[in-house]
Amino acid sequence: MTMLLTELLPVQHIVVPLEATGFRDAVLLLVQQLARVGAIRDVPAVERALASARGRDVVAIGDQVALPHFRTDAVDHLVLGLGVSPDPLDTAETTLATPPRIVALVLAPPEAATRYLQTVAALARLFIAEHAVDQRCR
């Protein structure tokens, strides 16, 4: 079954401007927004996953985008959140080499492994395209 980006990313899952100074704070703001709109049922579980995150749980795409992704029982289905910060985010205590301005958070239940991997790959392809990250984000 093919899913459109608009189905996966409703406007309520987008935070612009993403008012955070650091990458971890930006991800937490996205989690809070997703919880507010009912996309996450167990916020403490997501926060625990974030606290124990490893470098492989975040993919850097170019020099503007970070894609943190986790499988967790805290969601019932695949959830995507997107935030755009007005300034580059501090990446202290991360493995990111460059400070991103765009954060795309992917959360999926463990049984959605295939859709999870397909979504992460599709987002990576989308954001690596030169036209996807417009000059206004640079």
Image: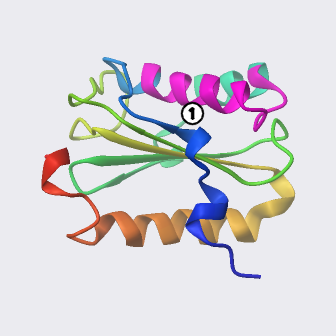
**Which quadrant of the view contains residue 126?**
bottom left
Mark 1 crowd level (few <14, some 14–19, many ≥20, 10 Å Cα): some
The quarter of the image holding the N terminus is bottom right
Q: Is residue 42 above or below residue 55?
A: above
Give percent across and percent down for residue 7: 66, 62
Give percent across and percent down for residue 61: 32, 57
- Identify the residue at the far bottom of this view: 1
Give percent across and percent down for residue 105: 54, 44
Q: Residue at x 59, y 41 (%)?
A: 13
**Which quadrant of the view contains residue 88?**
top left
Camera-side residue: 48 or 25?
25
**Which quadrant of the view contains residue 4?**
bottom right
Q: Of helix, strand and loop, which mostly describes the magenta segment? A: helix
Q: Residue at x 71, y 68 (%)?
A: 115
Camera-side residue: 100 or 38?
38
Give percent across and percent down for residue 108: 74, 51
The stretch in magenta equals 25-43
**Residue 133 at least partly seen:** yes
Q: In the rendered image, which residue does mark 1 sit on?
A: 53
Camera-side residue: 70 or 4?
4
Q: Is residue 37 left or right of residue 30?
A: right
Q: Is residue 86 left or right of residue 22?
A: left
- Identify the residue at the far front of this view: 11
